[in-house]
Amino acid sequence: MAPLIGRRLRKGAATTAVAAAAMAALTASQAPGFAAQEHADRDHRDRDRASGAQPSPDTPIDGGSSYHTDLPPLTKPDKPGSSIDLPGFPGSSTKAEAGIPASVLAAYKKAEAALRESKPGCNLPWQLLAAIGKVESGQARGGNVDDKGTTVSPILGPALNGNGFALIKDTDGGEFDGDTTHDRAVGPMQFIPSTWANWSEDGNGDGRSDPNNIYDAALAAGYYLCANDRDLSVQKDINAAILGYNHSQEYLNTVLSWFEYYKSGTHEVPDGTGVLPSERSDPPGNGSKTGSKESGKESGKGSDKEKGKGNGGARTLPKPEDGRGGSTSPSPSPKPGEGGTQTPGQDLPTPPTTPPTTPAPKPTGTAKLTAVGAKQLTATAGETFTGSPKVRAVDAAGKPVAAARVKYEIRGETSARFLGLVRSVTVLTGLDGTATAPKLLAGEQPGSFTLRATAVGREKVSPVDFAATVKPRPVPQADALARLGDGVLKTGTGGAFADLLTVKATNKGKVAAGVPVTATMITDAKKPQVNDKGPYFLDAKGKPVRTLTGLKTNALGQLTLPKILTDEHAGTYLLRLTTADGAVLDVELTVTKAAAP
């Protein structure tokens, strides 16, 4: 049984070495053999599900090592000590805490929709995923994800080495967590690699499952919570699902308080602008002392608690190489919601009755959008615009704003579309504040339209308009026409030529595809006039005509004419084929008097 982790760690910024190792491990997942292993893992997972796999209460899904980046409420929203942004708390401001980053919110709702189809009896509410995501990673570090939903930098928990956490030796060869000695919880939903192997999902449809991707992780967490035929519209099943995620009463209470909070109302905020902590779990000189059971129940005045005495003894937090950073020297006991460890059965200090008064720093938002490069876009019908529109987002001080959402929208009558054949798309700005639109397809409709870039969630920021023009396709050219085959075209009156006539167009000796060709029955090569007798074609309505337009050569530059029929007039006739560039081909047609029946 893994120890109950009362005050679970909130991991600080990962060290450069750990982050680099994790990214290297993720890159290595593209190596040969990884896809086969992923299929094997998925098959194993599917077999586990088919046999009614049970989330184990002995080893939590995250190994008891969640990566807290915020201060979660440790009591119900209407009790003292709740988060200052929870509803019902005097002086609260619900707007900030109720904001969920756009990609993260979309991932939760997409997972709910997927489970509604595949496991309708589970009744998974997306707010439950949001509550767990809040506690586990602060909604992926405030929505610090790229346009595919993958965290910009890895979110890693401490090494699960048995020192205050579950003991889980490496199961993935460092594939996801960069640790080849012990496993670590990974990603916005903090899956340990051994659990991910059984429950991994591809939530964003990119063909692979990645615990660092919020779409993949949210869908996998949804399946995990729905295990054992749970009905999450029933409270006892919700409790069991949360405890299966992490077997801790405090964890259950914390997640439930956020669950109720999100059910009372949320709103979308741009990626990268979610609420981040105003306090850290690893201040300078971090470490932890645990107080006695008795002093832990007091409101903060017991001398034993202050001196670190009691049956808990003194503990230091894991060293910086566990990815949390900070010092290992002792420090006062962690505040409610902060880092530290707890021995099994140990009670916890009562949360302070006075809420924090220092508000969390607000992220700097986009104050201005400017175009980068040309604002005039030109392409030929059927082709792709050269280059892609680009804008830069800056704040009020003129500094680049990273991870800001920029929406590109095609406005006006046009058949132009972005890749994926959509009229609008939202992308994130990079570290330099720039956001580049996807490839823009011109379509077949000539004309002009506007491509508008707007800062999502920033109505007061003026949009940037790009003027786009689609030019007509140039008419394919051909400087020569030649007949394929040299047989004599001959038939009797009142019949039809047995052989179809095929010609080939070329331009400077090369195949000319798509070349318009006109076919006309003429009276004379030197003074051509449309003939009113002899061979003819049938138009779309079956009416005899001696001129056909709208004919085009195929990809091979070839054109096969429709069947040629004859009337009652015998003689020698000419069929002239012409192109717009002046290429001419005359074909002789011979009509003989048909024998009397």
Image (cartoon, rainbow, N blue to C red):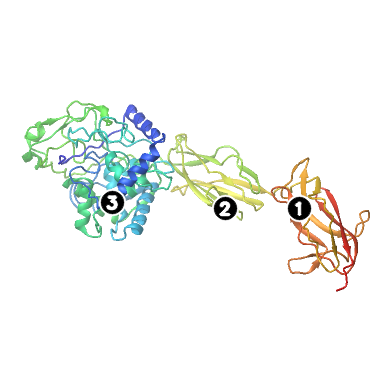
Query: With respect to residue 363, does 575 lie above or below?
Result: below
In the drawing, what numbered circle is on residue 129? none
In the image, 536: left or right of 285?
right
Question: Earlier along the polypeptide chain: callout 2 or callout 3?
Answer: 3
Q: Label 1 sits on what residue type? A: Pro
Residue displayed at 25% across by 54% down: 260
* Mark 2 and mark 3: Cα distance apart in space: 47 Å
Q: Where in the figure is residue 210, as x and y percent of width and height? A: 36, 41
Whether residue 520 appears in this view of the structure is yes
Q: Which residue is mark 1?
A: 516
Residue displayed at 61% across by 54% down: 414
Helix, strand or loop for disc 2: strand
In the image, 190: left or right of 532?
left
- In front of the other: label 2 or label 3? 3
Q: Where in the figure is residue 175, as x and y percent of width and height? A: 34, 34
Q: Label 2 sits on what residue type? A: Arg
Q: Which residue is mark 3?
A: 49
* Mark 1 and mark 3: Cα distance apart in space: 61 Å
Question: Earlier along the polypeptide chain: callout 1 or callout 3?
Answer: 3
Q: Where in the figure is residue 204, as x and y percent of width and height? A: 41, 47
- The residue most toward the bottom is 597
Residue displayed at 12% across by 30% down: 314
Helix, strand or loop for disc 3: helix
Locate the N terminus and report the quarter of the image it occupies: top left
- In front of the other: label 2 or label 1? 1
The 10 Å Cα crowd at callout 2, few under 14, some 14 to 19, many 20 or more, is some
* Mark 2 and mark 1: Cα distance apart in space: 33 Å
Q: Nearer the viewer, residue 197 or 358?
A: 197
Locate the C terminus and report the quarter of the image it occupies: bottom right
Residue 316 lies in quadrant: top left
Helix, strand or loop for disc 1: strand
Q: Which residue is mark 2?
A: 411
